[in-house]
Amino acid sequence: MDDIDPDQIAIMTLLEPHLARMYPCFPAALALYNEVEAHIRAEHDDRAAASSVYCHVWSGLQREFSEEPGFHFLTHRGLNLLNVRDQVLIRAKKVDANGRHRNADTEQQRTFDAQEELPGLPPAAARLVVGYQPDAAFSEVERVTVRRPLGRWVSQIVEADVERPWMDITPVELPFGIKPRRAR
């Protein structure tokens, strides 16, 4: 734990009591999407599938946390966020193995990911993406991650009942300006 970013430890410690309730929202959402008849899902492109799962995740989080003190669901110019005690703002997204999301490159998106202030949102709150990584068949969730965007850090939520319900999976990246050596 010595090598883990202190920011990551603080934020994940804040979220720790809630991770066991957050995690199931993601596999349940993908399972619900897969209850749609196969001939209908066959007409969905990646965006439609991810959008459908997102709607189920968002509804699941609302069912789970809407009565929880300190949890507030916000919509800011089309951006749905879960506000946890004005300390963390969470976006739910489909992500890759490194916890990175892909979506339309908008000024609002860049501002959120850069941890910058957005009018009407708690200015000091960490901006996070909690995401699910589906398998290649889009039938199961391989992992659920919590990421502080712009490559700061990424944690994987561990589903099992363990001492610490998350682990650091921040990818090792080369320092800025250094490029990998090519094989000869």
Image: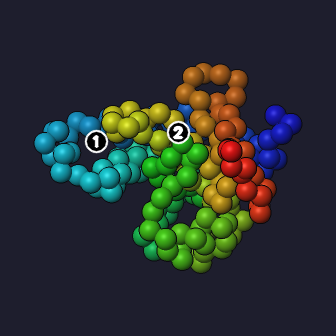
Q: Is residue 73 visible?
A: no
- Regarding mark 2 in the picture, which secondary structure is present there? strand
- Regarding mark 1 in the picture, which secondary structure is present there? helix
- The amino acid marked with disc number 1 is Tyr
Compute the Cα span from label 1 to label 2. Answer: 17 Å
Which residue reaches farthest front? 184
Residue at screen point 68% across, 34% down: 167
Residue at screen point 49% across, 49% down: 95
10 Å crowding of disc 1: few (<14), some (14-19), many (20+): many
In front: 37, or 58? 37
Left or right of 104? Residue 16 is: right
In front: 134, or 55? 134
Residue that carries the numbered disc 1 in the rendered image? 33
Residue that carries the numbered disc 2 in the rendered image? 144
Q: Is residue 83 visible?
A: yes
Q: Looking at the picture, how far across and down is residue 136, in whole percent?
A: 38, 37
Which residue reaches farthest right? 2
Residue at screen point 66% across, 67% down: 114
Q: Looking at the picture, how far across and down is residue 17, in whole percent?
A: 64, 36
- The amino acid marked with disc number 2 is Val
Figure check: 115 above or below 106: above
**Which quadrant of the figure has residue 161?**
top right
Q: Looking at the picture, how far across and down is residue 107, in whole percent?
A: 54, 77
Tell me the quarter of the image containing the C terminus: top right
In front: 13, or 112? 112
Which of pointers 1 and 2 lies earlier in the amino acid sequence? 1
Q: Looking at the picture, how far across and down is residue 35, in whole percent?
A: 23, 36
